[in-house]
Image: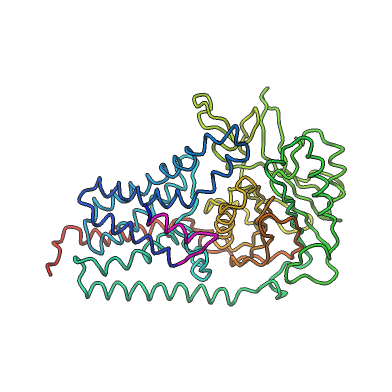
Amino acid sequence: MFSGAATSLSLAPLHLLPLSFGHAAILVLVANSTSVRLAAWRAWLWAFGYHISGLHWIANAMLVNPKEDAWLIPFANIGLPAILAVYAAVAGGLAKHLFKCGWQLWIGLSATYASAEWVRGHALSGFPWNLPSATVDGWLPLLQSASVIGSYGLSLLVLLVTMLPVIWIDRKTSIQQRILITAASCLLLILIIGWGALRLATIPKLTDPKGVVPGVVVKIVQGNVPQRDKWNPLLKSKHIKRYLSMSKQRRKDSIRAPGLVCNYMPTVVVWPETAVTYLMNDKSNLMRELFLSVPHKGNLIFGAPYIAQTDNKYRLYNRIFALDSQANVVWTFDKTHLVPFGEYTPLSGKLAISRMVRSKLDFTPGIGPLTMNLQGAPPVSLLVCYEAIFPGKTVDPKRRPSWLLNVTNDAWFGRWSGPYQHLAISRLRAIEQRLPMIRVANTGISAVIDAAGRIVTSISMGITASIDTPLPTALAKPMFSITGDIPFFIMVLSLLLVGNCWRFQPAEEH
């Protein structure tokens, strides 16, 4: 359990990369288990430590309204990690059953663990937070491989590399096998990192005219409204005025990203998720106020709740609006992937548990991902809040956008590690799709990420500020955007087949 917790320190914001090799501990635990049941139990303990440490920040969400929600902290901070660790337990037990020892167990556990992580990202509502790939976030050349094999394929690669040292203490693996396996693995890793470094060197930066979309300037507005104040009826008007004022800031008052021309004007202004806390059903006066923030021949994009009546039922949406310079709503986009127990209650008729978001209605999911047109920028794909954590679910396969826009409200999690992890996970989506991402967060971290995953500029946590930035250019459609997780499944099946070729052979005696 302690080794799992130590491994989580390789995640954002600490980025203690060497601790990623803590994954090796789970292989040692499984290898030294005398039964499948014991292997599963030890794998569960390791993963429980990893998740309870890596997800400690969830408690802050319950401290926003402590009188009503503090009692949920043990369920969130212990119960959720305990459930997530079950996937690792299944992987550990299955690997022990199929591969008894030696280097076969090394590749077998890597394959079963990565497969379990894929299931974790898809089962029920899915929660692919802090995958093994997130432990190497500080190693940008290696992250480039996600454009080919995706985050799950990268996770498998991370597991293979970080568990590799264990074969040097395994008596069932001969010295010749150790040398051969290590040499081949190091050569492959060097080739992957070298390819990634070469890609980074050849992709234009924002300071290069080829690295930006001509004539497009995005203003990112980070209002920095504390979660405790966000929905206070007495403060709603004050918050709107803050956003309006920041949207009209002069150039000298905004952070300037690299690559801006001297006499630029914003063409798109973006506010965070639910920046407007009024229900946007009949707000003509508010719309007139918002109109003042719309750039000439451009758009204002903001988030707000919305209630629609269909079939004599009221439906609540977490909606994103786009206004044009004539105060028309050009389009709306409804959040598709809702947060369980945050925006809706699973089995609400059977569970006496309230949502973190106080409302009489569960939120209704929209349809996405979708590519939306803008006046002041190329077509965009919207990701609301944690929709950005799901690999392969960020763009419409029928219509590829030119950039990704992630609007979020991470104020729930204060200044703990949650927002830093969210940013790290989100930028993998940019790398996977070879698309730039503009990230707009209420309290931070807002950022401009190019198509190679480089964070060009950002606004730190707890800062009230805006950024004026050119839009980085998109790159050619990558392999992952075409094949999805197929390369990952091929990798897993190949490893399982190779390991099983020697499964029934007697072990060497030394």
Against 258, residue 436 (above or below) is above
Q: Residue at the spot x=44%, y=39% of the render? A: 79
Looking at the rendering, which quadrant does residue 233 occupy? top right
Residue 273 position within the rendered picture, expressed as x and y whole percent measured from the top left: 69, 46
Question: Is the residue 261 above or below the residue 290 in the image?
Answer: below
Furthest-left residue in this view: 509
Q: Say which residue appears at 84% left-offset and 40% top-offset.
A: 286
Drawn side of residue 371 relative to residue 329, left or right? left
Q: Main secondary structure of the magenta part?
A: helix
Q: Is residue 8 magenta?
A: yes
Viewer-nearest residue: 455 or 146 = 455
Q: Residue at x 73, y 71 (%)?
A: 258
Q: Please state the horizontal and vertical placement of residue 496, each as a whole percent of the image.
A: 30, 57
State whether residue 402 appears in this view: no
Res. 434 in view: yes
In this image, 98 relative to 414: left or right? left
In the image, the segment drawn in magenta is: 3-17
Q: Quadrant of the C terminus?
A: bottom left
Q: Is residue 510 left or right of residue 37?
A: left
Inspect the magenta stretch and tell me whether residue 478 lies in it.
no
Where is residue 266, by image quadrant? Answer: bottom right
